Image (cartoon, rainbow, N blue to C red):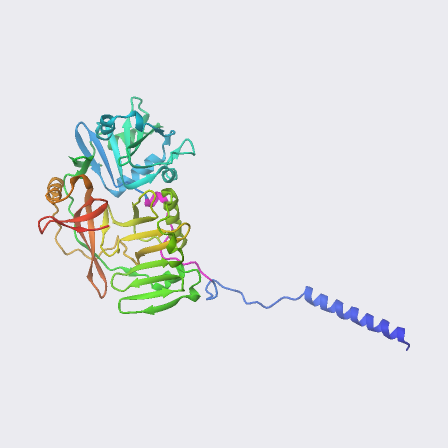
Amino acid sequence: MNYEKIKSAALALLVLISLAFTWGIWNYKPSYETITESSDTIVTEVEIGQQRKISSLLKPTKIVTHLQGQYYGTEAKEELTWFMEEMASWMFYEPENISNLLNEQEFNELLTGDSHVELFFAGPIPFNTMKNILAFNHSDVPSAVFDRMVVQLEEKSNSMSVYFVSVQERLVFKSRIESTSLAEFKRRYLAPSNHLEPYIAHQIRNGSLLYVRKEAPVLYTKQYLPEQIEGETFKKALFNDPSYVRRGSSSRSDEYTDGSSLMSVNHSTGVITYLNLAVENEIGQKIALYKLIDKSISFVNDHNGWVDEYRLFNTTPGSSSISYRLFLNDYPVFNEQGMAELSQTWGRERIYQYSRPSFIIQLDSPLLETEPPIELEGGEEAISKVLSQEIDVSLLTDMRIGYEMTIERELPKILAFEPSWYYKYNGKWRRLVTGGGGTADGLE
């Protein structure tokens, strides 16, 4: 066999080997294991509670109707929800700024006049937030905030004027709505009905009217056994890479850190505080309120963090802080240690501080009630006790019934909710303690 034949044979052999490898690659099927839903290798989304929309978190604090010099109102959750859903079916025509067209007397008459309905909010609400709940005929709405809405009947039976009012800034925007289905609204709120109860109005010196329910409802102290959420669950929810997080414990708290962020879980109160130290130098940045509301809701939605019933409660234009408060049925819940509040402080784009309780209460499942009902004072007596204190009356802006949350027992942790009168003074809510001469507990 000569040299050329050897080369040809070798080349043919290499071609055959190449074809064999190619065939093997084309037909190779790796024996991967099937991943089932129960496999521990699946990375699952953290689920603390659920996601919520702005429409479930934003409600008025009360509704007050002015009828022939008398006042009727409600703070019932069902009525507040019905009212917001009814307004969501209306079409609001472009709000017009009429602030400069009203003198002081006309401005006051707008808030105190007869045959109209007022909606009160816990704090300033931006138009850009409300347009996610109500329908406006134009997508562009005023870059302004309001804390009241005044609904006023017009001569046309299917038309009403709606005024968006900021009492502190003395701003009034007038809109108009037309609807063929206003009969039920008028029946419920523009005539005496069983949906409303008597209210009283007290004129604050150098201030507006303070509306308070005339008779206090019969309420009981309620007790709950909360369901604790593990700190490890919040670690997975709040840290970018939980595998880098280290845990330390003391007699008072558990602490988690990845070097740039810190999370602590208070053993006594169950309050979780998360700090993103990387944005500490951004504190105090002004953020448009509607953007802050959007970001605060999205942040909690990202880890399905809404539990029980929280409502938007503390907003300040230009601030980087915001809070949502726990409600038990129709009433806000207060606690000095932050056990009834979900609060956030933001930097420019990232959250700086996040504080919230680490438990679920299941508000519709209280422990058995064994205590007698709490006999709260009527509205007039409660106002009188507030005014008997050494306070600047012009700083008194609101008053309502709420619950004080306290730790009844540590092991197992039992929470007690006791009804009481609360009043808002200089921007902060205080509990009216009637047993000791009308002193007050200061609350945020």
Between 91 and 396, the residue placed more toward the observer is 396
Residue 318, image quadrant: top left
Q: Residue sitting at 31 percent across and 63 percent down?
A: 265
Residue furthest front as drawn: 281
Looking at this view, name the residue that lies furthest to the top: 155
Magenta portion: prevailing SS class: loop
Vertical comparison of 35 with 4: above or below: above
Q: Where is residue 433 in the image (x, y as percent from the top left)?
A: 13, 50
* Residue 1 in the image, given as x and y percentages of width and height: 90, 78
Q: Which of 350 and 375 is in front in this view?
A: 350
Q: Does the magenta stretch include residue 55?
A: yes
Residue occupying the far bottom of the picture: 1
Could you tell whether 2 is left or right of 354 in the image? right
Indicate whether residue 413 is drawn in magenta: no
Q: How many labels does the image show?
A: 0
Coordinates of residue 277 in the picture (x, y in percent): 38, 59
Q: Can residue 317 be seen in this view?
A: yes
Q: What stretch is highlighted in magenta?
A: 43-57
Residue 190 visible, this orientation: no
User: Which of 423 and 347 lies nearest the eye of the viewer?
Assistant: 347
Q: Which residue is drawn at 29% across and 21% down?
A: 155
Question: Which of the 4 quarters of the picture holds residue 263?
Answer: bottom left
In the rendered image, the vertical position of residue 255 relative to residue 290, given as above or below: below
